Amino acid sequence: MHFFTIASGSSGNSICIGNEKTTLLVDAGISGKRIEEGLNTYDFTTSDMAGILITHEHADHIGGLGVISRKHGIPIYATRGTINAIRRSSSVGNINDGLFYEIEPDKDFSLGDLVVRPIRISHDAADPVAYRVSDKRNSVAVLTDLGIFDNYIVENMQHLDAMVIESNHDVKMLEVGSYPYPLKQRILSDVGHLSNELSGQLLGRLLHDDMKHIFLGHLSRENNYPELAEQTVKLEVSMGDNPYCGTDFPIEVAPRDTASRLVEL
Ligand SMILES: [Zn+2]
Ligand SMILES: [Zn+2]
């Protein structure tokens, strides 16, 4: 399988996952033009995409969806709550009803040569999910936009080959930063975003000898630094109840506005 991020951060998210036969996008939270440029980095093009998996309806995940779906007619996969919220969203514009495919958490579905599992996440959106995408050999997951994790998340994210895991903020930077108090409370809540510390603690429970690549994603521009996220996550892994050191695996921050390296599994 192949896997790279096109954009990752609070200002826009889109990720490309596929194998020799099928390639898809997870989220389309930047402009159609930037998605096309990101895909072109590795000789893909938007019209190659077999589908777009949407995690939830926040603007940083669907900002480019209207333009892309109207221009290329790519099927959109999302939960019922997310589809309804997208339809109500004024910024996306009109999308042909026939492009929406309703999916349910915990129910695997096939998309070309790939199998997709939607996994419930705790986030302040209508019906948000993370995705695990597999073929016969490998599994890759996109796990961002969650305030907390539990055993359900840990169990569904075992034996991955690669993943994007949220490392949104440094709690101290957020607390002393300029955000209004209600927004700080929202981000820190159970339906907000994973801090660097929690991200490292969760990752410590997902690592195994065959994990090949980890991108830290969805970093806050105001309340985090890439170096701080990486160091904190690696430290939490090293201190955690697992056999590994943070330096045992390729752990790197996904670039905010440009395509990441191409991970080939
Ligand atoms: Zn969100
Ligand atoms: Zn988001």
Image: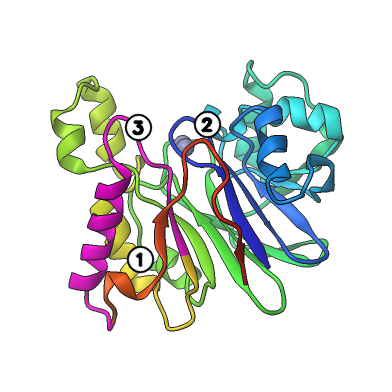
Residues drawn in magenta: 214-243
What element does badge 2 sit on?
A: helix
Mark number, residue 221: 3
Decide which of 148, 65 is in the foreground and name it.
65
Residue 195: in sight, yes or no? no
Mark number, residue 60: 2
Decide which of 238, 100 is in the foreground and name it.
238
Disc 3 packing (10 Å; few <14; some 14–19; many ≥20): some
Give the amino acid at mark 3.
Arg
- Mark 3: is the Cβ under 8 angstroms from ligand 2? no
Give the amino acid at mark 1.
Leu
Mark 1 and mark 2 residues within 8 Å of each other at the beta carbon: no
Would you say 200 lies left or right of 264 here? Answer: left
Q: Residue at x 52, y 72 (%)?
A: 160
Q: CA distance from mark 1 to mark 2?
A: 24 Å
Query: In the image, residue 181 lies at what x, y percent?
Result: 20, 23
Q: Residue at x 30, y 36 (%)?
A: 187
Disc 1 packing (10 Å; few <14; some 14–19; many ≥20): many
Q: Earlier in the sequence, mark 3 or mark 2?
A: 2
Query: In the image, residue 25 lies at what x, y percent?
Result: 68, 47
- Mark 2: is the Cβ under 8 angstroms from ligand 2? yes
Q: CA distance from mark 3 to mark 2?
A: 13 Å
Q: CA distance from mark 3 to mark 1?
A: 22 Å
Query: In the image, residue 177 lies at what x, y percent?
Result: 18, 27
Does the magenta run of residues contain 234?
yes
Mark number, residue 203: 1
